[in-house]
Amino acid sequence: MVNTQELETVARGMVAKGKGILAADESMGTIKRRFDSIKIESNEDNRRAYREMLFTTKGIEESISGVILFDETLRTKASDGTPFAQLLSGKGIMPGIKVDKGPVDIPNFPGEVVTEGLDGLRARLKEYKELGAKFAKWRAVISIGDGIPTYTCLELNAEALARYAALCQEAGIVPIVEPEVLLDGSHTIERAHEVTEHTLKVTFTQLFLQRVYLEGMILKPSMVVPGKDSPKKANVEEVAERTIRCLKRTVPAAVPGIAFLSGGQSAESATEHLNAMNAMGPLPWEVTFSYARALQDPALKAWKGDPGNIGAAQKIFYHRAKCNSAARSGSYNKQMEAAA
Ligand code: 5MM
């Protein structure tokens, strides 16, 4: 029996006023790429040191409700021996876990992928729950290109997202459902809008068919933005207006919250877009962030793997979290950046 009350309480806590989620669930390949950019090796010690720098930042609990962890990180202990999950819970931050196993090519559908990880998921969720995970995340990846995405790709990914979500709820874990429409390409904002709307429609149809309890889940979508190589850029108001229009057409008001991914936008753009959407309120759901790069990148660059830079990196991380917290109520402004 699904404990709907428990799911709803956790989901509401994840999108509490002024708060959002830190995505720190980089898989091995992704964290290696991040560390390559600051020229440090991706080994267990460096991964621990980096995540410890983020998680021990004083005051982040004012703006961060939960952190998505990778399997290794959920099992890692901070340098004083406290497991990361416990360290976060002690600050009132909920630990979450990425449970998908990443995307693989779909046979007969060049350029399209489906996310794997359903085999054995029921047992893994049981263990994650025992390790303290309150919520989970599964990411589907949708590319825009010539003739893609196909309906088959959208359908396969939506089916997997809904199966994952139902299994999470059975285990008493709140699912974050993340259908990411990639920023890569030269497509227009109109095309991004069309694809995102279609993706969300198909996703919510599957969530309905598989009886997922909408009040006990969080949606993590991409914002509607033009492809990163598109010659035609969009201003902040257009992105906010199109994204909200797209979501209002597709996301039932029963869903407590929408927590955006940043998808390769700059840290400041991701904050400005979130702010503009909340300034358009009232909205049917809480609208917040679940950023990885847009929260971490400036701090990663300041840290550079040097223990002497921890204080400076934490200040930057705290500042980004604060700016996004302000964007939750539409009260962020550029002066906040200058003041920092
Ligand atoms: C941290 O990145 C997450 C895991 O990605 P990989 O499986 O590729 O390592 C990713 O799902 C992330 O949570 C979201 O995409 C949001 O990250 P951004 O950087 O787009 O805000």
Image (cartoon, helix red, strand yellow):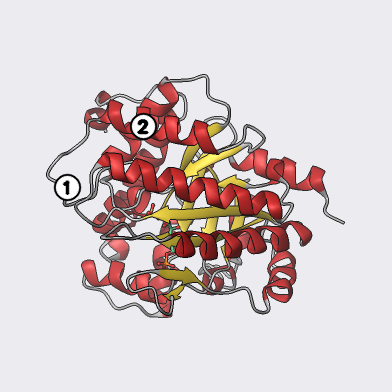
Quadrant occupied by the N terminus: bottom right
Residue at image point 29% right, 71% down: 33
Q: Is residue 17 left or right of residue 168?
A: left
Q: Which residue is mark 1?
A: 230
- What amino acid is found at the position of numbered circle 2 in the picture? Arg
Q: Position of residue 288 (x, y in %)?
A: 48, 37
Q: Please state which of residues 222 and 270 is positioned toward the viewer in this rendering.
A: 222
**Spatial distance from mark 2 to mark 1, Cα to Cα?**
17 Å
Pointer 2 residue: 242
Mark nearer the N terminus (2 vs 1):
1
Quadrant containing ligand 1: bottom left
Secondary structure type for disc 1: loop
Which residue is at a point 41% across and 68% down the rendered structure image?
49
- Residue 266 - label: none
Please give left or right for residue 158 compared with residue 306 in the image: right
22 to the left or right of 95 = left
Which residue sits at x=19%, y=52%? 186
Label 2 residue SS:
helix
Question: Which residue is more in the foreground, 314 or 296?
Answer: 296
Classify residue 75 as left or right of residue 34.
right
Q: Measured from the top left, where is residue 156 in percent x and y?
A: 53, 65
Instruction: Return the residue nearer the eye: 141 or 4.
Output: 141
Image quadrant where residue 142 sits: bottom left
Residue 238 seen by the camera? yes
